[in-house]
Amino acid sequence: MNRLEIDLKKLEHNFVTLKSLLNKNTKIIGVVKADAYGGGQFEIVEKLISLGIDTLAVGYTAEGLNLRKLNIKVPIIVFYPQLLNLTEIVKNKLEPSLYSKKTWASFKKIIEEEKIKNYPVHIKYNTGLNRLGFSYDDTIWVRQEIKNSPFIIKSIYSHLGESEAPKPNKACKNQITTFEKIKMSHKEDRDREIDFHILNTSGVFNYPNFQYDAVRIGIGFHGYANNFDWDKKLKPIAKLKSIITQIHNVKKGDLVGYNSGWKAPKDTRIGVLPIGHADGISRGYSSSNAWVNVNGMKAYIVGNICMDMLMIEIGDIFCNEGDVVEIFGELNSANDFSKKNKTISYELITGVGPRIKRVFLS
Ligand SMILES: *Cc1c(COP(=O)(O)O)cnc(C)c1O
């Protein structure tokens, strides 16, 4: 019934397009957190590796562990390790990003106790997003620590807060200026071949001059770049499909769904789809002007979304029980659909629930 179709050929198209925007020597870090943006970690990782990606990144330790269990051997950066996970990181040869004096000291202690030399780590600086990261003022401390640490510093990086915003953008500019200063102060540590990076997908389009040594791409592989013109260069890889379970004829004034969420303004037809808020179609889409694609026609979601189902008005659209319905995909991108719930493609695609089968086209 429901399925999330993932087209790996389109993933390849996106990879090739993004790569064409990069300088010859810029490395790509494949960001596959949150089950590869909801698309299915294993298949997407396999495809990325077959395309030549040699470093992956996840959000949390358990995600990296999963990849190791699936026998993925390439370096895996853990962007946001928690103190409690540091032992597991070492056991599974994951590469932590160290973002505070505390994470640094704790990880150093573990590595020294294990008598390991040259353990690969990444250093994260906060340059203005004010999420995780060392601050610019910590640079002296970090430099001192690098000198007598059991680590190999593979990269030093930061993250932009609004890389998709039209230029000139003051916040991004300030972040990049701070990152430049950080990079300068680490100049003498550079004989260790540290990679510097600050760009995500939108950054690749918006700030091509600041690729440094690597870029970190996630959403771009899925066909989105947070801007109408950039999106046009990419192809959405995922289509969320459902079917019409039952059709009702309703009369003007009839009520549809929980809490009388919708009252038919005229005699019409209602289709019931077996997908609900437990599957990632948030209750926010209830009577929200959001539509799904029924045989090429727009059918609007009516009434309150239930846990397991939702209702659409099909009116006189030619369709039958059992017909396939596309919730988002080609005609209706995840980007456009998500706007109806005042959110973004990232939230919609990573929220597609575990009950929905992932089907891969290659
Ligand atoms: C998720 C994430 C990315 C990927 O961003 P996209 O916009 O999906 O390309 C890059 N860097 C960091 C630190 C992230 O957390």
Image (cartoon, rainbow, N blue to C red):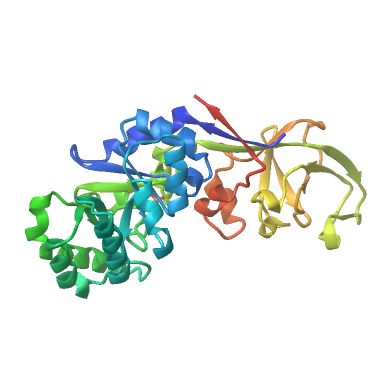
The residue positioned 57% from the left and 55% from the top of the image is 339
Name the spot of residue 221 as percent of width and height, x first: 41, 40
Image x and y of residue 353, in percent: 63, 47
| In front of the other: 119 or 321 | 119
Outermost residue on the top side: it is: 362
Residue 288, image quadrant? bottom right
Q: Position of residue 34 (x, y in %)?
A: 49, 49
Q: How many numbered marks appear?
A: 0
Q: Residue furthest bottom?
A: 137
Residue 234 as seen in the image, left or right of residue 208: right
Quadrant into which the N terminus falls: top right
**85 or 288: nearer the viewer:** 85
The vertical placement of 295 against 117, above or below, is above
- Is residue 224 found left or right of 333 in the rendered image? left
Q: Residue at x 84, y 63 (%)?
A: 259
Q: Is residue 353 above or below residue 247?
A: below
Q: Quadrant of residue 234?
A: top left
Residue 231 vertical position relative to residue 360 in the rendered view, above or below: below
Can residue 143 be seen by looking at this rendering? yes
Asked if one can make out residue 126 in the rendered structure from this viewpoint, the answer is no
**Who's the residue at 28% across and 63% down the image?**
109
